[in-house]
């Protein structure tokens, strides 16, 4: 019977593990040809999507090779990679797939012999496990960027896995969620403006402001919390696969708005109105004009002037700009 020959993909860092493999070659140490090495600048650059893609495309085993602990040429790339591998191994286990198919190994550039031995051992382990059950099973076409790709992949994994069995004790960098104190937020929209990943959105609704944080898009860069003028936004490092399953991909915060006393329209965030009133009180002025929306305020002002001219109650012509090109006029009482 023909012996099963596994395909093993290794993402190895240029500085150490690739150099160790090179050394094994130049010193004529043999290791199995089942290992296909992909050289990367640092193991910390190996994303979860790279590993899942390798499995999707037919790898029976995948490993990441990084520098020895505390000797990473990019400070902590190997530590970041280790956390990602931990999470993926836990997920594979929860899906009933042997976690030995994925691993991380640390070596220095001078460990050519160790690399050859490791390659031998890994190949025999994967050979015993047989072909990967993930092969070709989860292949999907991803077109909407790396984050969307990761979300789709994790979602398909989460559906197959028993999420309660996954150990989330290790925080994976690059995932976060925001917490907004709605009793302080003035709805300025600065967080939405600076978020380059499109994870924040401030929407004006009929009865208030809605601030949405899309969990899977947030990279925990903390730009939003840095610019928040009221310091009411906190970003937490969180990674929780159960959210993908529960469909809780958005964290919504509702911010109250003041309503126009005349037409009832929401027009100004409550906290901002309070801030303006507080400022005006320091200048011995009142904020009574904040009781009306801009449109009603104009009409109110016009009405006051007309009363002084004895035109109260008569129709008045107002101009409204419906588009940048067209001006319309209408009569109001
Ligand atoms: S959370 Fe901060 S930055 Fe965002 S809308 Fe509120 S006040 Fe502005
Ligand atoms: S932490 Fe970064 S990615 Fe996340 S919502 Fe704030 S600005 Fe956007």
Image (cartoon, helix red, strand yellow):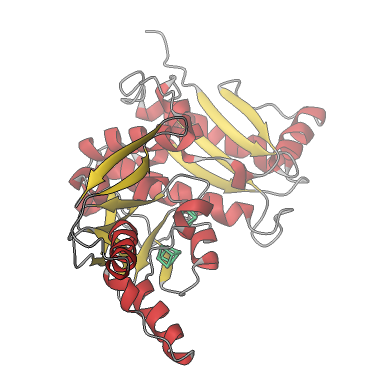
Q: Position of residue 233 (x, y in %)?
A: 42, 69
Residue 182 seen in render? no
At horizontal 46% and vertical 75% (from top left) the residue drawn is 230
**Residue nearest the observer in this picture, 3 or 61:** 61
**Residue nearest the observer in this picture, 271 or 320:** 320
At horizontal 32% and vertical 44% (from top left) the residue drawn is 91
Q: Position of residue 296 (x, y in %)?
A: 27, 60
Residue 112: image quadrant is top right
- Of all residues, the one furthest to the right in this rendering is 26
Ligand 1 visible in quadrant: bottom left
Q: How many marks?
A: 0
- Of all residues, the one furthest to the top in this rendering is 1
**Residue nearest the observer in this picture, 248 or 318:** 318
At horizontal 71% and vertical 34% (from top left) the residue drawn is 21
Residue 129 seen in render? yes
Above or below 78: residue 269: below
Q: Which quadrant would the N terminus be assigned to in this image?
A: top left
At horizontal 76% and vertical 32% (from top left) the residue drawn is 22
- On the rendered structure, is 278 left or right of 26? left
Q: Position of residue 318 (x, y in %)?
A: 33, 47
**Residue nearest the observer in this picture, 206 or 46:** 206
- Of all residues, the one furthest to the front in this rendering is 310
Above or below 124: residue 102: below
Residue 162: image quadrant is top left
Above or below 277: residue 47: above
Residue 144: image quadrant is top left
Q: Position of residue 174 (x, y in %)?
A: 49, 52
């Amino acid at each position: 019977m023909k012996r099963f020959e596994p395909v093993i993909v290794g993402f190895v860092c240029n500085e150490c593990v690739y150099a160790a493999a090179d050394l094994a070659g130049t010193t004529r140490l043999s290791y199995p040809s089942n290992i296909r090495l992909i050289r990367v600048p640092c193991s910390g650059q190996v994303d979860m999507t790279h590993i899942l893609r390798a499995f999707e495309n037919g790898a029976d085993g995948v490993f990441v090779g990084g520098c020895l602990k505390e000797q990473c040429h990019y400070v902590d790339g190997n530590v970041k990679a280790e956390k990602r591998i931990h999470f993926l191994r836990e997920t594979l286990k929860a899906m009933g797939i042997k976690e030995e198919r994925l691993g991380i190994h640390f070596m220095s550039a001078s460990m050519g012999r160790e690399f050859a031995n490791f390659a031998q051992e890994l190949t025999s382990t994967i050979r015993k496990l047989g072909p990967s059950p993930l092969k070709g099973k989860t292949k999907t076409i991803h077109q909407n960027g790396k984050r969307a790709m990761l979300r789709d992949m994790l979602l398909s994994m989460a559906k197959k896995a028993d999420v309660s069995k996954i150990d989330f004790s290790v925080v994976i960098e690059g995932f976060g969620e925001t917490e907004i104190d709605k009793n302080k937020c003035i709805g300025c929209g600065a967080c939405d403006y600076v978020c380059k990943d499109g994870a924040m959105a401030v929407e004006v609704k009929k009865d208030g402001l809605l601030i949405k944080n899309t969990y899977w898009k947030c990279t925990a860069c903390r730009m939003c919390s840095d610019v928040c003028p009221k310091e009411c936004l906190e970003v937490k490092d969180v990674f929780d696969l159960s959210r993908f399953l529960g469909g809780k991909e958005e964290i919504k915060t509702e911010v109250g708005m003041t309503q126009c006393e005349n037409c009832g329209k929401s027009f100004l965030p409550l906290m901002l109105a309070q801030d303006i009133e507080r400022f005006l009180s320091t200048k011995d002025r009142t904020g009574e004009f904040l009781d009306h929306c801009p449109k009603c305020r104009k009409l109110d002002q016009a009405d006051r002037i007309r009363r002084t001219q004895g035109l109260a109650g008569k129709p008045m012509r107002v101009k409204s700009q419906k588009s940048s090109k067209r001006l319309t006029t209408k009569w109001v009482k």
